[in-house]
Image (cartoon, coloured by chain):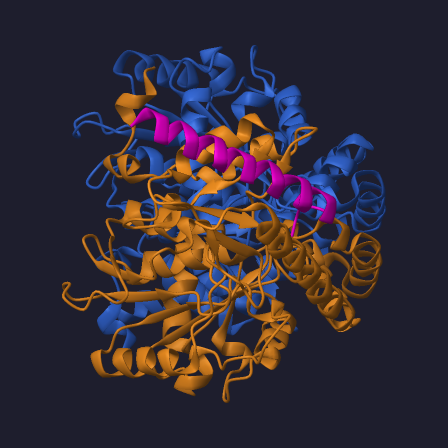
Chain colours: A orange, B blue
Amino acid sequence: MNWENHFAARTQRFRRNTVREFLRLAGQPGIISFAGGMPDSNMLPVEEMKVACERALRRIGAKALQYGPSEGIPELRHLIAERCICAGVTAENVLITTGSQQALDLIGRVLVDDGATVAVQNPTYLAALSAWAPLGAKFRTLDDSSASKTSMAYVIPNFRNPTGDTMDRAARQELVQHCEAGRIPILEDDAYGELRFEGEPVPSLLEIAGTLSGPVIHVGTFSKILAPGLRLGWIIASTELIAKLVQARQAADLHTSTFTQYTALQAVEDGILDYLLPRLRAAYRQKRDAMLQALSITMSEDVTWSRPEGGLFIMLRLPAGTSGRALAARSLESGVLVVPGEEFHIEGGTETVRLNFSHPSLAQISRGISLLAESIRTGSLEERCAR
Amino acid sequence: MNWENHFAARTQRFRRNTVREFLRLAGQPGIISFAGGMPDSNMLPVEEMKVACERALRRIGAKALQYGPSEGIPELRHLIAERCICAGVTAENVLITTGSQQALDLIGRVLVDDGATVAVQNPTYLAALSAWAPLGAKFRTLDDSSASKTSMAYVIPNFRNPTGDTMDRAARQELVQHCEAGRIPILEDDAYGELRFEGEPVPSLLEIAGTLSGPVIHVGTFSKILAPGLRLGWIIASTELIAKLVQARQAADLHTSTFTQYTALQAVEDGILDYLLPRLRAAYRQKRDAMLQALSITMSEDVTWSRPEGGLFIMLRLPAGTSGRALAARSLESGVLVVPGEEFHIEGGTETVRLNFSHPSLAQISRGISLLAESIRTGSLEERCAR
């Protein structure tokens, strides 16, 4: 069989996930990776999850290994609703997903029609584009008001992947009002909101809307605050929308693992987040500071960068004419992985790279940024000579 | 927001999963459920999974809670390849999925084009239809050779859901030859193959094809032989097809839980299947026998049923003119859940219901079949009087 002859037309719109491709290299010895969006492995609660699993299975028994409800186990839905600040949110408004990537996929299946336009921040999380492009979505930037009718807006208000930027309150209010008036669904992806280590929290789009009867759909995840290997995320939405999403999810994978749901529930009920979140914030603040310091020491004046108040990422803007893609390739030769910022852009971004500071050690940050600065200088020189 | 106004066109092709709807009722006290496809909860290895989780986390550490490869962890891919009888299958041919439902979803995304025709057994697993209908698939019966060009054939050769039937060797050979000649991909869904408790095993379609260069894609799962709550399934296919499926799966949910993968791997390496499979086969044989006996004692002569040599299901054919759907509703009033066979049919099947024998206890089987026979008699009487 020549399988290519059998591929459906939509496969031509599949995007390679460059970050995931890079991650194949990230585990190799001697490599310093600023490429992924992975939590610090030293902060993953191995002992606590052992205990939680043992306690969950003892308490719940076979039910934790049996088929479960498509919406998620009631206790975890309830817990997510309780943790949500917005008034009136109950367990009925929560759908547990197999990581927040599945939340994006399911919302796409239900709300993104073939040929529909999705308004996104530029740059934005690239796997959101990967999820919706095969459905026939077209993308425009959120601030491009000249464009055609918008089916959905997709926003990462806190510590956006890939820039680390946060939308201020005024911008959030304006967006919610605009979408309320135009009846445009807003997907609020809040993967990083609980990882604020500096400054004042800004109310979520859902809090600003104040109701699930409005345009906001809220997506969250345990990946960055507990463990990504559990693959646990959630959607908070109106019950009308949840009902349709449940149909999509039954076709997708029936339901999320009851085993991981009951284990995570047990861990959270035992207080793991109270213990882990302050430690994560302190550790990531320290790492961000280390990266900012290394950047200010090593980079030439024509390199600039974002200064996030939380999350996992810093975006580097290279000297004019320096290709982020070429830099990523050159940097790899010196053992440092970075992702070309272009990957996250629907337009522009060729002169940027994304840096992750949560996963590497402090020593790797210092050494890696120094090597990266070297690669930028070499590149600038070569590119000047080539002219 | 009136969300219905925002639903994509494909949502009109979403199917309600009647079995999953029924399962909401199944947990209620006093209800006897023959509705699901659930393993016997008493056979779920609670203690063993506690031990496996503890050992896996001790041995693997943080890696078992971190992001992992989209294809699945190498050790589990290797194990699945080793368990596969077909020559030449290696870890590179294996994609670990979030249950075998996700295998169906991903294969659909890659191979089922809008308007494509998928040939299925009639009846067949209803959630396969749910997975592919929203993609624009049309369905025809496998033996309808008059129909248009087929994009894919979908077959459950062993103990088919919902009938319990098994394709004999000659039929398998004919199908493989036909699809080889016509270059038609065959999706072999082997969810139940290891649950044979009587008779001689028949070689799988993949074994008959003898190679992954042919038309066969093989799908398996731990749901029926270990625990469905883990949500672990797999696809065995040519590396060319695996590469494209990996792109689809990155957009779907990045990867399957590393936590469940390492835990299941540990359990299998510790020999859990050697212990569990013989016990499952013995228990399900006993339950099938109990159901067959109860049927032969209680049912009138104009009711017939299948006699499976493995798996989880028996199909009941009702007296002419008796609606399976009406029976399911009537039976529910007496506390017995069955699924109308029509749900699984792309045509016909109105006079059938599907019975599951793996989940109910022996006492429930005896009592439930007796109540069901009563409901059939009442119905037949009413329907005769109504004429």
Is residue B165 visible to the viewer in this orientation of the structure?
Answer: no
From this view, report whether residue B220 is shown above or below residue A261.
Answer: above
Q: Is residue A234 above or below residue A203?
A: above
Horizontal side, residue A192 vs residue B328: left or right? right
Question: Looking at the image, can residue B337 be seen?
Answer: yes
**Above or below for A274 versus A127:** below
Q: Position of residue A141 (x, y in %)?
A: 27, 60
From the viewer's side, name the closer residue of A172 and A117: A172
Q: Residue at x 40, y 54 (%)?
A: A105
Instruction: Verify whether residue B190 appears in magenta.
Output: no
What secondary structure characterizes most of the magenta part?
Answer: helix
Q: Quadrant of residue A196?
A: bottom right
**Nearest to the observer: residue A94 or residue A219:** A219
- Which residue is painted at 34% across and 40% down in the image? B109
Range of residues picked out in magenta: A358-387
Quarter of the image where one finds residue A332: top right
Image: A19 above or below A224: above
Residue B139 horizontal side relative to residue A293, left or right: left
Q: Nearer the viewer, residue A244 or B61?
A: B61
Locate residue A270 relative to residue A191 in the image: left or right.
Answer: right
